Image (tube, rainbow, N blue to C red):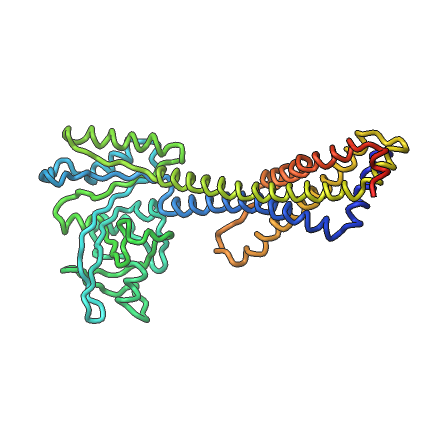
Amino acid sequence: MLRNETWRVAAEALWSNKLRAFLTTLGVVIGSACIVLVVTVAVTGQQYVVGQIEAVGSNLVYANYEINPQQAVVKSNQITLADMNAVKASLPAVAEVAGTRSTPAAVVTEGVERRVALVGVTQGFQVIRNLLILKGRFLDAQDMQSRSEVCLVTSDLADRAFPNENPIGKHLRVGEISFTVIGVFKERVGTFGLSEIQQFTVLVPFSVMQYVTGDDSMDLLMAQAQTPEDVLPVTRQVGALLRSRHPSGANYLVQNLGAILDAAKSIGLALTIVLLLIGFIALMVSGIGIMNIMLVTVTERTREIGIRKAIGARRSEILYQFLVEAMLISGFGSLLGILIALTIPIVVRPLLPGNLRVPVPWMAVVLAFLVSCSTGLLFGYLPANKAARLQPTESLRYE
């Protein structure tokens, strides 16, 4: 009953100064909301960045022959179609392989010659690069085997070459070869021309590119690992396999997207730490505000404390009462801040891209509540201890 009475008295004391109590809680509201929102933004941002990188090619390993500009290119060192098939056949952790070879070319659209990237690709290229086919279809095994003069074009090139027309079935002359357009595509996530796919790109069967260039060498060999855990072993295995199949001294650059993912995670962690520090600073400021208001309250209620002690209230009971008041301020503020933080993602969700989810981690909610309540108790102890140490005779004489 004594404990219940203490909580009731603490609540009544705060209610008698509603505006002051509310203004004191604002700092706690802001701090707790910051903690929840910071963790939510960090988790969402990391998931979004990882998703964007994986959309370029999930579990992707890519290799190319490093050419020394001071030395002549050695044909026997170049990656070939046979190397790609060997990777597929001999590495069980590889789910799919693909190869590309690019060469600059020109097409004439609307009487204007435009430079394009003519890229010969193998059949697994769409799966590995996660391309989005907007119209038509991708190259199939028959196209590869029969060296069909068919192609896919980027959406930008289709709009320029065939404005206000369906490009499927149309003929596009690239250099000296006339190709039939069978599809229009785009990257699921734009690489801004930093990959083999440029703004104006024409994809053709690798067998056609082999016929044009006179050999089956590749600029880039890509392998897709079965699982994320297989990426590093596959990276090492692809490098070892290429070196074993070519003369000694040949250098091959074998990479994966792990470095980019690690960099993105490191940046996200750094931003999270900085923003969390801002949230903790806000809570520290609110804690100082709680301490200040509680000191004022102790001064205002000095006679009340003296009366309570005169009729038998123990020091621990006075200490407990003022700690409860600080706890109520910080606890209510943290709950209000958490509620605001949970509401904001729901409000902004319609404004976000359709595939972006904003999960609110439960750990962030628990962390915000515990830290806010701890701040209230920590900064509320000094005023509570001051109140508990007051002497009854001095308190009763206080005006």
Q: Looking at the rendering, in which quadrant would you find the C terminus?
A: top right
**Image point (12%, 47%), residue name:** 214
Residue in the foreground of this view, choosing between 247 and 371? 371
Residue in the foreground of this view, choosing between 208 and 338? 338
Residue 103 picture location, percent across and down:
18, 52
Instruction: Check the image and report above or below for 210 versus 378.
Output: below
Q: Looking at the rendering, in which quadrant would you find the N terminus?
A: top right
**Image point (29%, 37%), residue name:** 255
The residue sitting at the right extreme is 311
216 sits to left or right of 188 = left
**Image point (72%, 48%), residue name:** 21
330 sits to left or right of 107 = right
103 sits to left or right of 13 = left
Q: Image quadrant of residue 324? A: top right
Q: Image quadrant of residue 154? A: bottom left
**Residue 338 appearing in the image:** no
Q: Image quadrant of residue 264? A: top left
**Residue 91 appearing in the image:** yes
Residue 123 picture location, percent across and down:
28, 47
Report how many numbered discs are placed on residues in the image: 0
Residue 232 picture location, percent across and down:
34, 32
Residue in the foreground of this view, choosing between 247 and 135? 247
Residue 73 picture location, percent across and down:
11, 40
Instruction: Check the image and report above or below for 118 versus 43.
Output: below
